[in-house]
């Protein structure tokens, strides 16, 4: 798979956002045909020839040294995540990397599920680089229940965000959530361009969602390991929760996200109510056993928690369920 167009678009977009003043250069004249730096200005800042930089920006990073990449990162003022993304783009085409990388996992180990289940006071979920929500504790399933309609299979957070109209009500800041989804998928696509399921997901979202397509074209990448999210849950109301993302050392492509509320806050009260409500409605189901063998990855399906959001309608826990499909674009 060639990623030359991704390299070209990424470098061009990073160059366009920096003014000469931001780069410490004098801007001579006002008739500049580009919104940011010229190619020759980036080449000068990176200490390479203009011809060589033009080659790089055209997507040809084969054989480029770490020293040149570091100079390029400095010239374009890339942050740590953008720097990592550029290295992924530069190295992803090598035979060694293609052979080493594996598709994002679709299962969790039993010990990870036990860890989740032990976290009784905080919603917790595990997701992979494609944003598949693979596992959760009981409170995590209750939190994300509004995005599920009971079908079997893992929920994909990006698909739910862009294609399920319920996400607009459920996610308190939908615009930021959408930006975060695309930035994470863009980062994963640079890290693992050989993941066919990821390629299929991106193609589906780009085809069905104009808002996804616009964001994807921006080539923004971010890694979100801490922050806050606001949820509007149909049972307990609004919750603003702080999250911490913990990469699993033995499964480096899986991240455990745990959510907590500020003690004594309305969100803390709402979270306690969610725990009480979900425990009351829980039919006693437990996670299905997970094979601890070293066989290939398999889809993990978690049990239906039978949580209810309105009237007598049962809404299963979101993790392990795809969102309800809508028209060409949710919202």
Image (tube, rainbow, N blue to C red):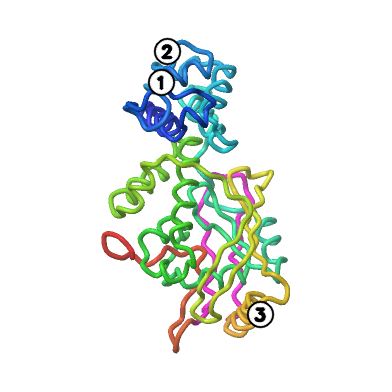
Q: Are marks 3 and 1 in contact (CB under 8 Å)?
A: no
Q: Tell me which numbered mark, 3 or 1, is placed earlier along the sequence.
A: 1
Left or right position of 1 against 237 = left
> In this figure, which residue is indicated by the disc labeled 1?
39
> In this figure, which residue is indicated by the disc labeled 3?
269
Which numbered marker is on residue 50? 2
- Give the magenta-colored segment's residue range: 283-308
- For the residue pair 237 and 203, the one nearer the viewer reads as 237
Which numbered marker is on residue 224? none
- For the residue pair 22 and 254, the one nearer the viewer reads as 22
Name the mark nearer the viewer: 3 or 1.
1
User: x%, y% of residue 166?
Assistant: 40, 70
On screen, residue 140 above or below 41: below
User: x%, y% of residue 205?
Assistant: 34, 51
- For the residue pair 196 and 90, the one nearer the viewer reads as 90
Q: Tell me which numbered mark, 1 or 2, is placed earlier along the sequence.
A: 1
* Residue for point 38% across, 44% down: 216
**Residue 296 lies within the magenta run:** yes
Alpha-carbon neighbours of circle 1 within 10 Å: few (<14), some, or many (≥20)?
Answer: some
Q: Secondary structure at mark 3?
A: helix
Q: Secondary structure at mark 2?
A: helix
């Amino acid at each position: 798979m060639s990623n030359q167009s991704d390299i070209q678009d990424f470098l061009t977009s990073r160059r366009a956002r920096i003014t000469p003043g931001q780069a410490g250069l004098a801007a001579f004249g006002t008739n500049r045909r580009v919104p940011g730096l010229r190619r020759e200005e980036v080449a000068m800042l990176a200490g390479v020839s203009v011809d060589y930089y033009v080659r790089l920006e055209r997507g040809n990073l084969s054989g480029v040294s770490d020293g040149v990449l570091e100079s390029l990162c400095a010239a374009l003022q890339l942050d740590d995540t953008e720097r990592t993304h550029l290295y992924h783009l530069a190295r992803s085409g090598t035979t060694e990397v293609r052979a080493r990388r594996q598709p994002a996992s679709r299962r969790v180990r039993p010990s990870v599920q036990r860890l989740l289940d032990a976290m009784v006071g905080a919603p917790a979920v595990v997701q992979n680089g494609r944003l598949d929500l693979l596992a959760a504790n009981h409170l995590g399933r209750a939190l994300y229940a509004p995005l599920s309609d009971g079908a079997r299979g893992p929920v994909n957070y990006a698909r739910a965000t862009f294609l399920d109209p319920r996400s607009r009500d459920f996610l308190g800041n939908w615009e930021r959530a959408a930006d975060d989804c695309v930035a994470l998928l863009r980062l994963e696509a640079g890290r693992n361009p050989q993941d066919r399921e990821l390629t299929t997901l991106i193609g589906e979202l780009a085809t069905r969602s104009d808002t996804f397509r616009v964001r994807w074209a921006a080539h923004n990448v971010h890694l979100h390991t801490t922050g806050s999210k606001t949820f509007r849950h149909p049972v307990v109301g609004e919750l603003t929760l702080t999250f911490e993302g913990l990469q699993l050392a033995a499964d480096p492509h899986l991240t455990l996200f745990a959510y907590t509320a500020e003690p004594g806050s309305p969100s803390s009260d709402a979270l306690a109510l969610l725990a009480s409500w979900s425990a009351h409605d829980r039919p006693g189901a437990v996670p299905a056993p997970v094979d601890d063998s070293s066989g290939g990855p398999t889809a993990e399906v978690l049990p239906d928690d039978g949580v209810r959001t309105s009237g007598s309608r049962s809404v299963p826990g979101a993790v392990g369920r795809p969102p309800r499909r809508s028209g060409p674009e949710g919202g």
